[in-house]
Image: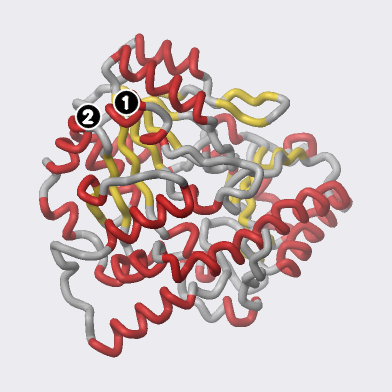
Amino acid sequence: MSAAPVLPLPLHRLRERTSEKWREYPEDVLPLFVAESDFPLAPAVTAALQRAVELGDTGYTASRTPLADAYAGFARRRLGWDVDPRRIRSTADVSMGIVEILRRVTRPGERVVLTPPVYPPFYDLVAEAGAVAERVPLVATDDGWELDLLGIEAALAGGARAVLLCSPHNPTGTVHSRETLAALAELAKVFGAAVISDEIHAPLTYPGATFTPFLAASPVAAELGFAVTSASKAFNLAGLKCALMITAGERPADVVRSLPIEVEWRTGQFGMLAGTAAFSADSDPWLDGVLVTLDRHRRLLAELLAEELPAARYRIPDAGYLAWIDLSELGWGDDPARRILREAKVALHFGPHFGDEGRGFARLNFACAEDVLVDAVRRIGALARS
């Protein structure tokens, strides 16, 4: 990758931020837990927000915006995916989009397949929609993690009505293959189930891996699938509240069209403006530069763990800036991040929150400055040697 790297802001500047990452813990703690990144905003995003402030452009989000066209262009350039802008609706965030779709493809008490270890709010979203989570854990192989298609088939045969997919997967950084996604779609068709794919980490797929949007995996996937995505992870815009619900097939499109207008009105005006700028070609160089830095950090983390925590096990992710680290051999119990926070003053995400498969694990966010990453791992290494 030839792009110039985009470097995270220094720690003293970041501590001026008021978001969750920088207000949850005291200043002696290095916060590497929640999925916020430490990069400056993309220049096009900054310009769009500054212009809105100058104009006082802070009213309701319009019924017609350039957001869908901007995303369609982004998908074409970055993902090789042709999206019909008319099949895109916005809402406040990916979680809200998932809940609203689940409410229409499941009935109260019906089961939804989750693939743990997985983004902890998924469990709450299924419950909020009135459904029940059915866990079909990922399968760990020598090459990484994979969907357990046989387990998903059994769950669907037993009556599960939907699969909530995390693609790329959080916390493992797994990029599911086109063949796997197509096979999942075939299973869903056989049993009359829907697949909802959370693709929020897709823009952060690294060289060497190929992200396949679920709706582009096969004609069957397009026929029955829903995709929900946002600029919020790649561009650090979570607080601005804007996500996209995307369909290709007629029946999923009818479901999304049937959602109350209030679902779309929950889109933040600043989120729409920032998302449009983020998905524009003007932001491509910035995103390329961020990927250069994150690519370096995901590999540096492997080197640091080998030096400081040789008992740790870590597979370099194919997408995203989250590292899923097995610390079980250190003997720090089911939730090692608790001791790390208390004694090393490094905040990681608690492994068991991702499901039973997270016992002994912790999730680390490496979208930070290199010196912060080095300091954090060395603090944990010192704890292991104490």
Relative height, residue 379 to residue 115 (above, below): below
Q: Which residue is outermost to the bottom?
A: 54
Judge left or right: residue 52 versus residue 173: left
Judge left or right: residue 170 versus residue 263: right
Question: Residue 30 placed where, x, y %?
Answer: 66, 66
| Secondary structure found at label 2 | helix
Question: Residue 246 placed where, x, y %?
Answer: 29, 44
Q: Which residue is mark 1?
A: 162
Judge left or right: residue 219 versus residue 256: right
| Secondary structure found at label 1 | strand
State yes or no: discs 1 and 2 in contact (Cβ < 8 Å): yes
Numbered mark located on residue 105 in the image: 2
Relative height, residue 58 to residue 191 (above, below): below
Quadrant into which the N terminus falls: bottom right
Question: Residue 73 placed where, x, y %?
Answer: 37, 56
Mark 2 nearby-residue class (10 Å; few <14, some 14–19, many ≥20): some
